[in-house]
Image (cartoon, grey):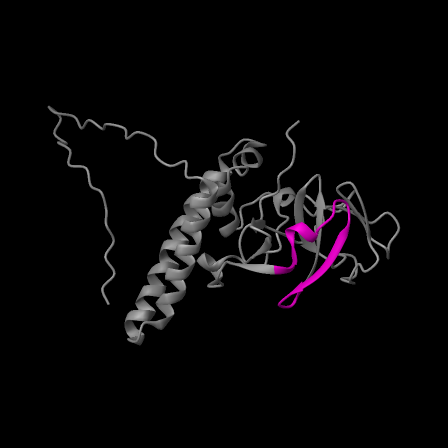
Amino acid sequence: MVVAMAMTTVTANTTEDSPAEFVPESLKGFMTNSEWDELLNRADYLITSLESIDDSKTRQNVFELLKVLDKIHRESLTRLVRLFKEGVLEQVVTDPPIRTLMDLYDLLPISQVCSDTDSEKIALSSKKLARWIPSRFGAKNLKNDLLYSDQIEDHFLFLSKVKNKIFAFSADCVINHELMIGATLKGFSLICPHHDGCVYDIRNGAKLGSDAYIGCYPVKKEKNRILIGFDMPFIPELPSF
C-alpha cells in the first residue's frame, strides 16, 4: 500500500530583481455542524480500517506516519496557544471544529473540559470509533423536568428534558463515584441525594463551587429515537452574558 500526500506548491521567482509575490487565498470552511460530524465519523472509520492492512510493514509505516503528523500538529498547536492572550482560547473553542482540535491535543482550558471523553478521545487519537447509540427511551416518552435512568454498554446515565431540550449525563457522583439513584432535578440543577450541597449543572456537568465535572454526552433525535454520542467531543450550549 502506498500512501500519497497531496501538497499544494507555489512557484515563486526568488531573485532580487523579481521578489516573490504571494496572493492570499480566500477563506474556506464554515461547514454545518452535521457536515463536521460526518467528516469526523469518516476520519474515524478510515483510521480504524487501516488496522486491517494485511502487510504488517506497510501497516506499521502508516501508523508511524500518523504519529509523526500528530507530533507535528501537537507541537505547532501548543506553541500557537502559548501566544494567546488570556481569555482568547476560551472564546475560540466555542467553535465546534476548533474545540474538537484542541480536545484532541489536550489543549482545552480546564474550565472547558466537561466531556466524558476526557480520558477517551475520539478515534483520531485513541482509535475508538465515535458512534451514536439509541436510548431505550423515545423522545415522546420524556416529560419535562424529570430524570430517567438508562444504561448504554457499561455507562450508567441520566436523561432529562428541560425546556423541551434533551440532556444526557453521567449518573456517577464525582465525590465517591456512587450512582445518584434518587437524585432530583430543579431547573438545570441536578441535586445529588448522597451529599449535602452537591449540585451539578446538567448543561455542562459542572459541580457547583468546584472544578469537578460529571460526564456529559451529545444528544440528537431521529424521529422518536434519542441517540447518545460516545467517544466524541461534547460541546455545551450555555447562554452568553
Q: Which residues are magenta?
A: 135-155
Q: Is residue 198 visible?
A: yes
**In the image, is 170 to the left or to the right of 229?**
right
Whether the magenta-drawn stretch holds residue 1 is answered as no
Q: Nearer the viewer, residue 72 or 37?
A: 37
Q: Nearer the viewer, residue 34 or 99?
A: 34
Q: Is residue 105 visible?
A: no
**In the image, is 154 to the left or to the right of 145?**
left
Which quadrant of the structure image shows residue 136?
Answer: bottom right
Rendered location of residue 226, percent (x, y): 60, 54
Which residue is rendered at x = 44% and y = 55% of the image?
A: 41
Which quadrant of the structure image shows residue 210?
Answer: top right
Rendered location of residue 48, percent (x, y): 41, 65
- Rendered view: 166 above or below 118: above
Rendered location of residue 68, percent (x, y): 36, 57
- Rendered view: 109 above or below 68: above
